[in-house]
Image (cartoon, grey):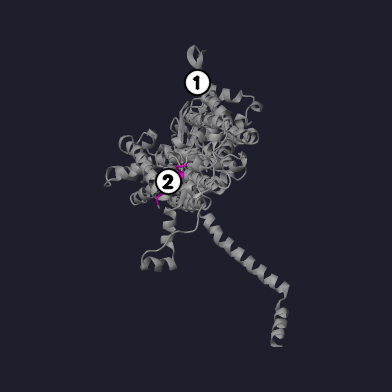
């Protein structure tokens, strides 16, 4: 939807620059980009995510000035940041809480795309770039979580790098090559720090491509019907800059509640114990944003199969544009798919719950039984529940969406975005932007 | 006239096989150069010389009392030295080897001392769960051996996997007796 540029330099200096490097034109075109007039608040997470990336890079670069990537000093250096460095308590919490906020926003953004069919033609590449960003975000978050060198850092790193040891034949060599030793140690910490500093800039580059592709094909919208006339669109500024700004303000309030009142609520107490290679914490769990994948990993009692299943859970997202073949983008007009989608969201939460639980504990109590003379709960364990949720997760992408693509009858859709917003009245022209 | 001779001269110079040879030779040289600079970039991530050098420790078994387990750090991983009770040894030997996921008899997991005798009371293992590398807890689990708290693998009194996601038995490190009661690991 990127029409011809409407920018006209007003000053001699701007004109001079425009003929040599049209960077002001690029910015002006960005700000006046014609966006669908019916975007709702689910569409503000892109802007929120851009802010999250800036917050993480800024606070992270500052933390790197005080942090020491050495197994003997790392843990103490983080404590020093929190206690002795001026405003270190603020910046360290901002970075740690910021990671959770980043994932919160990215999950909202992804669910939005899933519901409104934002992955469908011609936006497949936007979607795939988004999946790539998510993948690099996960890597960055994992590497960063290792750096404070607490018990969860150390054992999380041990478990995750252990995935590579499942590769047939070369697994152990590959794992030791990644670690730079026989186990997670100083060499591992130093390379994790270097890569943790690098990857956010890879994310920034991918975000550039993501936005470029978005501006090339135009934004999707809640009814999934493409813009046809100028009255279907609004200029990005001031209409969506203001909407984004309001959403960002609300988001920052939530961020601030965690930052100032609950800085440790999303972390794990065991990470305040320094890493100990001789002692594994009684219950290892990843950060909340990885819990659903952790549940999928544990859904099968086989090491390699568990890893392949977890990788598969991410790979299906990449190929989703070719799994959902239904011609209607938005699930607003897909009366069957929207219910399966709602169940999908519920199961994503259930997977997270199972990831947090101990596999053999009872998740849903159905009664009680006697074991060795002691009365214990019986019912569905987290292990079984996780298996059911894993089956639904994959069935949604691999069976439900492909089948619905063939059989589902959509309900009647409006003719255009303008008609969807204004009804069939003649008010559309009068309400168009005053420019 | 001059034009046609120039064309003629160019055509004469255009020897396809000679050009292909130069193209392939240049490409091969560039590929060799890229590999030569690429390999150090990959290899630097492997184990450094000092990491490889710090590879062996000595353990005095006589200091481990019956029913006790010693934990020592070797190559960044814990080594378990378990002085097993007669009941634990009997339990380990009574298992039908064919029925377990990673079939291995108890005596295959022991090393002969300097007199050539097996010492079933001393079990020396890498105390790392073969699933994702957590340290299993001793005297726990359904088989009285070890239990891994991470993903629920149960090991028996010989350190063999009996139940749970771990694919293999806990590893026996390379070790040998250097005197009556002292072993050298690594």
Q: Which mark is residue A364?
A: 1
Q: Residue A75 versus residue A309: which sits nearer the camera?
A: A309
Magenta span includes A433? yes
The location of residue A344, given as percent across then percent down, is 53, 31
The location of residue A115, given as percent across then percent down, is 52, 37
Q: Residue B127 versus residue A79: which sits nearer the camera?
A: A79
**Horizontal side of residue A93 vs B59, given as left or right:** left
Q: Which mark is residue A430?
A: 2
Q: Are marks 2 and 1 in contact (CB under 8 Å)?
A: no
Crowding at dot 2, Cα within 10 Å, few <14 / some 14-19 / many 20+, comes out as: few
The location of residue A261, given as percent across then percent down, is 31, 35
Q: Secondary structure at mark 2?
A: helix
Q: Residue A309 versus residue B131: which sits nearer the camera?
A: A309
Output the chain of dot 2. Answer: A
In front of the other: label 2 or label 1? 2
Work out whether disc 2 and disc 1 sit on a shared chain: yes
Quadrant of residue A71 within the rendered picture = top left
Q: Magenta stretch?
A: A426-434
Where A116 sits versus A371, above or below? below
The extreme bottom residue here reads B1
Q: Secondary structure at mark 1?
A: strand
State the residue at coordinates (54%, 35%).
Answer: A331
């Amino acid at each position: 939807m990127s029409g011809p540029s409407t920018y006209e330099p007003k000053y001699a200096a701007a004109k001079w620059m425009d003929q040599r490097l049209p960077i002001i034109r690029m910015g002006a075109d960005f700000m006046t980009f014609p966006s669908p007039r019916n975007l709702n608040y689910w569409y503000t997470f892109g802007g929120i995510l851009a802010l999250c990336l800036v917050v993480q890079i800024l606070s992270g670069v500052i933390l790197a000035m005080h942090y020491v990537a050495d197994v003997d000093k790392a843990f103490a250096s983080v404590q020093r940041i929190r206690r002795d460095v001026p405003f270190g308590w603020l910046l360290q919490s901002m970075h740690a809480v910021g990671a959770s906020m980043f994932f919160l926003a990215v999950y909202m953004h992804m669910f939005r795309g899933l519901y409104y069919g934002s992955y469908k033609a011609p936006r497949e590449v936007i979607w795939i770039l988004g999946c790539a960003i998510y993948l690099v975000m996960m890597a960055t978050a994992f590497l960063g979580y290792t750096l404070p060198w607490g018990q969860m850092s150390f054992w999380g790193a041990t478990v995750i790098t252990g995935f590579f040891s499942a590769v047939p034949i070369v697994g152990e060599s590959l794992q030791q090559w990644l670690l730079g030793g026989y186990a997670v140690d100083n060499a591992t910490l130093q390379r994790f720090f270097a890569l943790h500093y690098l990857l956010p800039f890879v994310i920034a580059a991918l975000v550039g491509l993501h936005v470029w592709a978005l501006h090339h094909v135009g934004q999707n919208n809640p009814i999934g019907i493409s813009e046809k006339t100028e009255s279907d669109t609004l200029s990005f500024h001031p209409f969506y800059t203001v909407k984004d700004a309001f959403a960002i303000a609300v988001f920052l309030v939530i961020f601030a509640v965690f930052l100032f009142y609950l800085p440790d609520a999303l972390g794990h107490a065991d990470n305040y114990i320094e890493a100990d290679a001789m002692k594994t914490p009684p219950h290892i769990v990843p950060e909340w944003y990885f819990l659903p994948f952790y549940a999928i990993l544990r859904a099968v009692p086989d090491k390699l199969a568990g890893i392949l299943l977890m990788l598969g859970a991410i790979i299906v997202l990449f190929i989703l544009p070719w799994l959902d073949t239904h011609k209607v983008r938005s699930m607003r007009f897909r009366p069957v798919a929207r219910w399966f989608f709602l169940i999908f969201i519920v199961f994503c939460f259930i997977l997270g719950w199972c990831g947090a639980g101990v596999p053999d504990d009872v998740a849903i109590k159905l009664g009680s039984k006697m074991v060795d003379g002691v009365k214990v709960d019986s019912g569905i364990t987290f292990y079984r529940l996780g298996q059911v949720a894993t089956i639904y997760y994959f069935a949604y992408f691999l069976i439900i969406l492909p089948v619905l693509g063939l059989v589902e009858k959509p309900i009647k859709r409006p003719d255009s975005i303008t008609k969807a917003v204004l009804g069939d009245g003649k008010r559309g022209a009068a309400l168009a932007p005053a420019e | 006239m001059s034009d046609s001779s120039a064309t003629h001269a160019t055509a004469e110079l255009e020897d396809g096989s000679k050009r292909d040879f130069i193209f392939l030779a240049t490409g091969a040289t560039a590929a060799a150069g890229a590999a030569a600079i690429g390999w150090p970039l990959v290899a630097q991530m492997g184990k450094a010389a000092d990491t490889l050098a710090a590879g062996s420790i000595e353990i005095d078994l006589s200091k481990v009392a019956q029913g006790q387990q010693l934990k020592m750090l070797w190559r960044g991983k814990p080594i378990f030295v378990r002085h097993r009770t007669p009941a634990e040894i009997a339990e380990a030997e009574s298992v039908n080897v064919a029925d377990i996921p990673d079939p291995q008899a108890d005596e295959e997991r022991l090393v002969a001392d300097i007199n050539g005798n097996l010492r079933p009371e001393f079990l020396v293992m890498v105390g790392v769960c073969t699933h994702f590398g957590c340290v299993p807890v001793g005297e726990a689990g359904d088989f009285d051996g070890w239990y891994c708290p991470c993903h629920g693998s149960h090991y028996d009194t010989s350190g063999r996997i009996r139940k749970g996601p771990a694919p293999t038995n806990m590893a026996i490190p390379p070790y040998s007796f250097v005197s009556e009661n002292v072993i050298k690991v690594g």
